Image (spheres, rainbow, N blue to C red):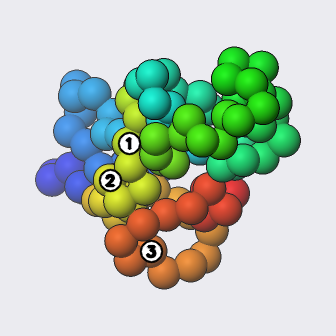
């Protein structure tokens, strides 16, 4: 019997291999290459953290908005879109073209 390409959770992987990347939450890559994570980009929780770490001009120190995977790797919005398409990650109902937004996650 041939193993289906997707398991019961919708993951595309080979038994015994690490799980494929999953996008888990919004993240901000800062000018100093630190990654700050939160519920959504510029949601109150992430703004609070950014303010405590970078002061009142924190928004000027954001290098890129993106996401983190379950392995803690920062990825761009475009790479995140590739990951969710390739691995059939369940998102909110919206057509994903070349980028995703935190509202797409939940």
Marker disc for residue 75:
1
From the top left corner, tell me how far across and down residue 35 is, in percent.
51, 27
Spatial CA span between label 3 and label 2: 12 Å
Q: Where is residue 87, by image quadrant?
A: bottom left
N-terminal of the two: label 3 or label 1? 1
Q: Locate the C terminus by quadrant.
A: bottom right
Name the residue nearer the viewer: 87 or 5: 87
Q: Residues within 10 Å of mark 2 (few under 14, many from 20)?
A: some
Q: Which residue is mark 3?
A: 96
Q: Where is residue 104, by image quadrant?
A: bottom right
Spatial CA span between label 3 and label 1: 16 Å
- Residue at (65%, 42%) from the top-left corner? 59
**Residue 82 in sight:** yes
In the image: residue 48, left or right of residue 29: right
From the top left corner, tell me how far across and down residue 66 is, in percent.
48, 47
- Residue at (15%, 53%) from the top-left corner? 2
- Where 34 falls versus 30 (above or below)? above
What element does badge 1 sit on?
A: strand
């Amino acid at each position: 019997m041939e193993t289906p390409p997707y398991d019961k959770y919708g993951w595309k992987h080979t038994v015994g291999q690490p799980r494929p990347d999953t996008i888990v939450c919004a993240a901000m890559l800062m000018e100093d290459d630190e990654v700050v994570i939160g519920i959504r980009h510029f949601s109150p929780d992430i703004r609070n953290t950014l303010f405590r770490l970078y002061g009142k001009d924190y928004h000027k120190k954001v290098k890129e908005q993106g996401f983190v995977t379950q392995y803690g790797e920062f990825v761009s919005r475009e790479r995140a879109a590739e990951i969710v398409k390739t691995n059939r990650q369940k998102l909110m109902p919206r057509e994903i073209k070349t980028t995703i937004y935190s509202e797409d996650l939940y």
